[in-house]
Image (cartoon, rainbow, N blue to C red):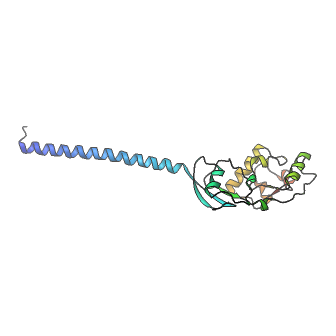
């Protein structure tokens, strides 16, 4: 078949239109896909934590995955002069939805009467020298491990429990933690608190 001048012009226009359309879709679909991937990755790396208590600007803050507790406190304007930061593990990694409570020194300072039946001599000396109870809502793993019968595994379970279920409302609630029965509770009940 022999094309005339008119057919050649139409063929060129159609070819150009097809080429332009394919090039446009390939180019811009690629950009959109990359943008969606970038947005998705950026969203996956963001978490939200609630910082309350003795900080200058309590509230919910967007943090990056891998940030630590001290980053969240800094983002909330830093701790106030009354804050007791010794009761918090500042180096602990943040988790999405976590609530960080910065207690005041006054709230955490209280005298403890240590029973002869519940602690070894070393532990009694520790608690007397500290002059306060272990707050199971804010204590770090190391602090929890100073309690009689609470080792690495149980201290981590206590921390995991309060992250999942919120802070303990009473010291008796610690018995809900797997591995802490009535006997273990009796050994630590005079050494722990859930508040001031």
Residue at the image position 84 percent from the left and 50 percent from the top: 184
Residue 19 found in image quarter? top left
Q: In the visual, does 172 lie left or right of 28?
A: right
Foreground residue, 131 or 179? 131
Q: In the visual, does 97 lie left or right of 40?
A: right
Q: Is residue 150 above or below residue 55?
A: above
Residue at the image position 41 percent from the left and 45 percent from the top: 34
Q: Is residue 166 visible?
A: no
Residue at the image position 48 percent from the left and 49 percent from the top: 40
Foreground residue, 114 or 67? 67
Q: Residue furthest right?
A: 116
Q: In the visual, does 50 lie left or right of 40?
A: right
Of the 4 image quadrants, the one containing the C terminus is bottom right
Foreground residue, 1 or 51? 51
Of the 4 image quadrants, the one containing the N terminus is top left
List x then y, in percent, for residue 11.
14, 43
List x then y, in percent, for residue 169.
75, 61
Q: Give the total number of marks visible in the rendering.
A: 0
Q: Residue furthest front?
A: 81
Q: In the visual, does 184 lie left or right of 33?
A: right
Q: Is residue 40 visible?
A: yes
Residue at the image position 50 percent from the left and 49 percent from the top: 42
List x then y, in percent, for residue 190.
87, 56
List x then y, in percent, for residue 146.
82, 47
């Amino acid at each position: 078949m022999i094309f005339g001048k008119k057919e050649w012009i139409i063929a060129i226009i159609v070819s150009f239109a097809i080429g332009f359309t394919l090039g446009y879709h390939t180019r811009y679909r690629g950009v959109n896909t990359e943008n969606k991937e970038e947005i998705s990755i950026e969203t996956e790396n963001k978490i939200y934590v609630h910082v309350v208590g003795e900080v200058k600007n309590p509230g919910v803050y967007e943090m990056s995955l891998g940030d630590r507790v001290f980053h969240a406190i800094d983002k909330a304007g830093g701790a106030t002069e009354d804050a007791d930061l010794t009761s918090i593990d500042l180096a602990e990694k943040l988790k999405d939805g976590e609530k960080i409570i910065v207690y005041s020194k006054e709230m955490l300072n209280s005298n403890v009467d240590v029973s002869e039946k519940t602690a070894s001599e070393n532990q009694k000396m520790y608690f007397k020298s500290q002059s306060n109870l272990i707050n199971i809502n804010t204590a770090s793993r190391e602090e929890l491990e100073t309690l009689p019968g609470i080792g690495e595994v149980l201290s981590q379970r206590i921390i995991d429990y309060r992250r999942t279920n919120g802070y303990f409302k009473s010291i008796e609630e610690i018995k809900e933690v797997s591995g802490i029965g009535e006997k273990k509770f009796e050994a630590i009940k005079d050494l722990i608190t859930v508040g001031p």
